[in-house]
Image (tube, rainbow, N blue to C red):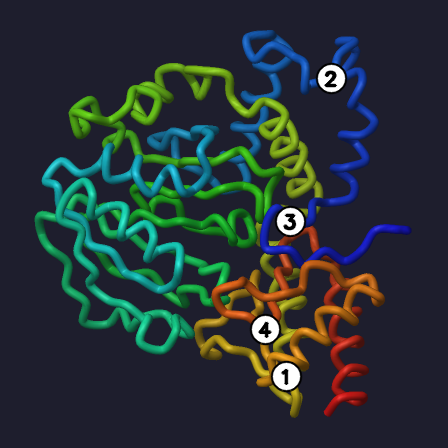
């Protein structure tokens, strides 16, 4: 069997070119006679891998010099705790809750201080992004938190909240490197890489220098202090070395593709193919509000649980994998990250049309 079109939300599709290069280098990386998987993280070859990865990421995102880049473990979920532990000097933070992941982050932050939900879209099952106009933030808040793209519900912030001098923290796990972003708008940007950049096991944190502080909450574990990781250049303990290597290959691939502006254009084109079909379909319906639709994650339903299940089952025979929606919402979800080719989206839409004809 050949390669399928893998619409999984994460771990997710990776560029075929990257996988082929990793395969070619599996037994002997760059003449070392060993795999990156077996290489000491203190060795010169690995130092070159992680330093090049950071340099390429800085170039891709135009990261200013006053931001640190960290390659960590623990997933985005660990950062739900690490962020308040490191940033809550006043023990106050404002959270905008637009889906499952920001809700979980908000709940975690309440363990460490006075976390306040300033807006939520839970009233309509997170099918939209809360209205940001007129939002007021606590002047003493240590940060304002958003999840910029909600993987499960397929929503994306059309604009950013104006937080003034309060640092804005964003979880970009499911839209990382899918489009250019102005890093200077944020105090901290983070995400797990297993959706759009690499294999599960690596979390990237981009944090402004003034937020890398010694005066963190006193019970913060040493390994979760940004000061620890900055001083050690992400090597305080053994990092997810092979995952970082794959991320580095993806960064090179993105540069070869033309960078993030080119990826954004490709992603808009792919999303338009799918949304245009959903908008004219009489069987399928997208669940996110149009103006808040994600370019990365597209949830949709037929309105019938039986038809949804049939669609997911029949999709496999058309080489369409992992199209089932998240267990909390049901239906279907197509995650169309950077590495998903346009042909994959076209194949999905062709199958949807065939299914609608047979079951409409």
Q: Earlier in the sequence, mark 4 or mark 2?
A: 2
Q: Which residue is mark 3?
A: 12
Q: Earlier in the sequence, mark 3 or mark 4?
A: 3
Q: Earlier in the sequence, mark 3 or mark 1?
A: 3
Q: Which residue is mark 1?
A: 284
Q: Secondary structure at mark 2?
A: loop
Residue at x 54%, y 34% (from the top left corner): 201
Q: Position of residue 63 (x, y in %)?
A: 43, 37
- The residues bearing labels 3 and 4 have C-alpha atoms spaced at a distance of 19 Å
Residue 331 is tagged as: 4
Q: Secondary structure at mark 3?
A: loop
Residue at the right extreme?
1
Residue at x 63%, y 65% (from the top left corner): 324
Asked if disc 4 and disc 2 are in contact, CB closer than 8 Å, the reply is no
Q: Which residue is mark 2?
A: 35
**Residue 5 relative to residue 236: left or right:** right
Give the position of the C terminus as an image quadrant.
bottom right
- Name the front one of labels 3 and 4: 4
Q: Secondary structure at mark 1?
A: loop
- Name the front one of labels 4 and 2: 4
Q: Residues within 10 Å of mark 1 (few under 14, many from 20)?
A: many
- The residues bearing labels 1 and 2 have C-alpha atoms spaced at a distance of 46 Å
Quarter of the image for residue 246 reads top right
- The residues bearing labels 3 and 1 have C-alpha atoms spaced at a distance of 24 Å
Residue 155 is tagged as: none
């Amino acid at each position: 069997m050949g390669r399928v079109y893998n619409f999984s939300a994460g771990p997710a599709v990776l560029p075929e070119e990257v996988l082929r290069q990793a395969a070619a280098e599996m037994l002997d990386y760059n003449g070392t006679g060993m795999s990156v998987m077996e290489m000491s993280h203190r060795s010169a070859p690995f130092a070159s891998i992680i330093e090049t990865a950071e340099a390429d990421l800085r170039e891709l995102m135009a990261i200013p010099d006053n931001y640190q880049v960290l390659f960590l473990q623990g997933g985005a979920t660990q950062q739900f705790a690490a962020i308040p532990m490191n940033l809550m000097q006043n023990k106050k933070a404002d959270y905008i809750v637009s889906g499952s992941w920001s809700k979980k982050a908000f709940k975690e932050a309440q363990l460490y201080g006075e976390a306040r939900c300033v807006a939520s879209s839970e009233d309509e099952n997170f099918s939209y992004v809360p209205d940001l106009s007129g939002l007021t933030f606590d002047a003493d808040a240590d940060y304002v938190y958003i999840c910029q793209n909600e993987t499960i519900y397929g929503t994306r912030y059309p604009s950013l909240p104006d937080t003034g001098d309060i640092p804005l923290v964003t979880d970009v796990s499911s839209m990382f490197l899918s489009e250019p972003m102005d890093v200077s708008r944020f105090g901290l940007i983070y995400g797990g890489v297993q959706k759009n950049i690499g294999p599960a096991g690596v979390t990237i944190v981009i944090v402004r220098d003034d937020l890398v502080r010694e005066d963190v909450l006193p019970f913060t574990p040493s390994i979760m202090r940004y000061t620890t990781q900055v001083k050690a250049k992400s090597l305080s303990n053994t990092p997810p070395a092979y995952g970082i290597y794959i991320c580095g290959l993806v960064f090179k691939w993105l540069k070869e593709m033309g960078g993030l502006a080119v990826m954004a254009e490709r992603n808009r084109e792919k999303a338009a193919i799918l949304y245009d079909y959903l908008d004219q379909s009489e069987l399928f319906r997208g669940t996110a509000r149009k103006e808040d639709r994600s370019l990365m994650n597209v949830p949709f339903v037929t309105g019938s649980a039986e038809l949804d299940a049939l669609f997911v089952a029949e999709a496999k025979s058309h080489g369409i994998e992992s199209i089932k929606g998240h267990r909390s919402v049901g239906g279907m979800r197509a995650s169309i990250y950077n590495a998903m080719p346009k042909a994959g989206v076209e194949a999905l839409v062709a199958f949807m049309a065939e299914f609608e004809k047979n079951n409409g």
